[in-house]
Image: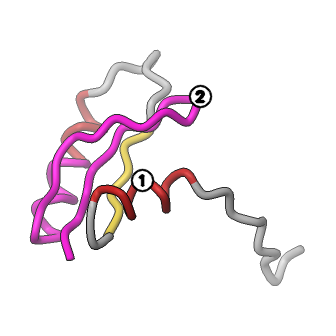
Amino acid sequence: MPYFIYRISLQRSLTYVDEFVEYVKAREIARNMRRVKSSDDDELIKIIFAKDRFEAETLLKARREHQPSEDD
């Protein structure tokens, strides 16, 4: 399964960037994107592991419940 990189806006809209077979390459690209992004840019850069773009976008859009930690 490939690794997908997405930009996520504050309005939770997704912009597909690229996909990679190797995690190391995806991580390198994502880190570089985060490093060069301007300070007033509120988009998040995310890597997700999924079988295809549809699954990746479904996982990124899904609302997750807060999982209490041991400190809560």
- What segment carries the magenta color? 1-30
Whether residue 42 is in magenta: the answer is: no
Q: Secondary structure at mark 1?
A: helix
Mark 2 or mark 1, which has the lower sequence index? 2
Q: Which residue is mark 1?
A: 57
Q: Amino acid at mark 1?
A: Glu
Q: Of the numbered discs in the image, which one, if any, rests on residue 69?
A: none
43 and 56: which is toward the camera: 56
Left or right: where does residue 16 sit relative to residue 44?
A: left
Q: Which residue is mark 2?
A: 11
Q: Amino acid at mark 2?
A: Gln
Which residue shows up at 39% across the image and 64% down it?
Answer: 55
Left or right: where does residue 21 sit relative to residue 32?
A: left
2 and 72: which is toward the camera: 2
Whether residue 4 is in magenta: the answer is: yes
Find residue 56 and report its image quarter: bottom left
Left or right: where does residue 37 sit relative to residue 71?
A: left
Q: How many marks?
A: 2
